[in-house]
Image: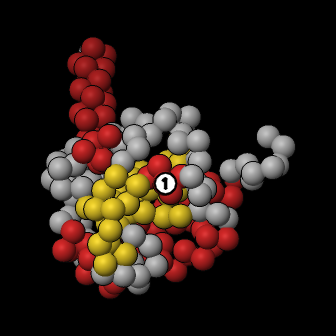
Amino acid sequence: MARPILSRIALMSVAAGLALPAWAALDIGDPVPKFIATAALGGKTFRYSLADALAKGPVVVYFFPAADSSDCSIEAHAFAEAIDQFAALGATVIGVSADDINTLSKFSVKSCQSRFPVASDESKSVINGFDALMQTRPDFANRLSYVIAPNGKVAYYYQNLNPDKHVERMLNAVRALPRPGSPK
């Protein structure tokens, strides 16, 4: 009698595990892919280089499913509201999605309030490089945020489709980074 119950529990556990979102392949300490992408800031497009941004300090790279969706607009607005706090810590922020650059140009003004850039990754090469592809809807990036230390390695990451905690967690992770000139 115990075997059928254990078999059902094992089957349910496997099924439940398959339904869970995948964890980020890039773990703390892993080097990140350096990317160059077309981005928009305040409605104007330009070439964004992660390597150039890291030369100036830590970078928050956050992936989001779709510009102008309710949750993505909430998250972008929250990052925009906190951008001065990131800047005070020497950090910059870039959002990345599979949206086209025209959509992101408008989003950069409306939801990002012209406070930080958003990059277009229609080919999903950056999204895949950061293991941020949504498994259940492969046309979209997952809601996944990384803090990248100036050395190009992952200092922290957080994955959750709920946009509410990403900014708070990214700020706390940037605050926890060693400051230049401070003892390690």
User: Where's the C terminus, which quadrant?
Assistant: top right
Whether residue 25 sits left or right of residue 100 in the image: it is right
Whether residue 4 sits left or right of residue 118 in the image: it is left
Question: Which residue does the image show at 29% across and 48% down from the upper left?
Answer: 127
Asked whether the viewer can see residue 63, the reply is: yes
What x and y, as percent, mark residue 20? 31, 42
User: Where's the N terminus, which quadrant?
Assistant: top left
Name the foreground residue: 31 vs 21: 31
What x and y, as percent, mark residue 113? 41, 84
Examine the rendered structure and indicate whether residue 99 appears above or below residue 41: above
What x and y, as percent, mark residue 166? 48, 62
Examine the rendered structure and indicate whether residue 33 appears above or below residue 161: above
Examine the rendered structure and indicate whether residue 105 appears above or below residue 124: below
Q: In terms of secondary structure, where does tag 1 sit?
A: helix
Residue beneath disc 1 = 52
- Quick one: which residue is furthest to the right in this view? 183
Name the foreground residue: 67 vs 101: 101
What x and y, as percent, mark residue 138? 17, 48
Question: Which residue does the image show at 50% across and 57% down from the upper left?
Answer: 53
Question: Which residue does the image show at 52% across and 80% down from the upper left?
Answer: 81
Whether residue 2 sits left or right of residue 78 in the image: it is left
Residue 170 found in image quarter = bottom right
Amino acid on which the number 1 mark rests in the picture: Asp
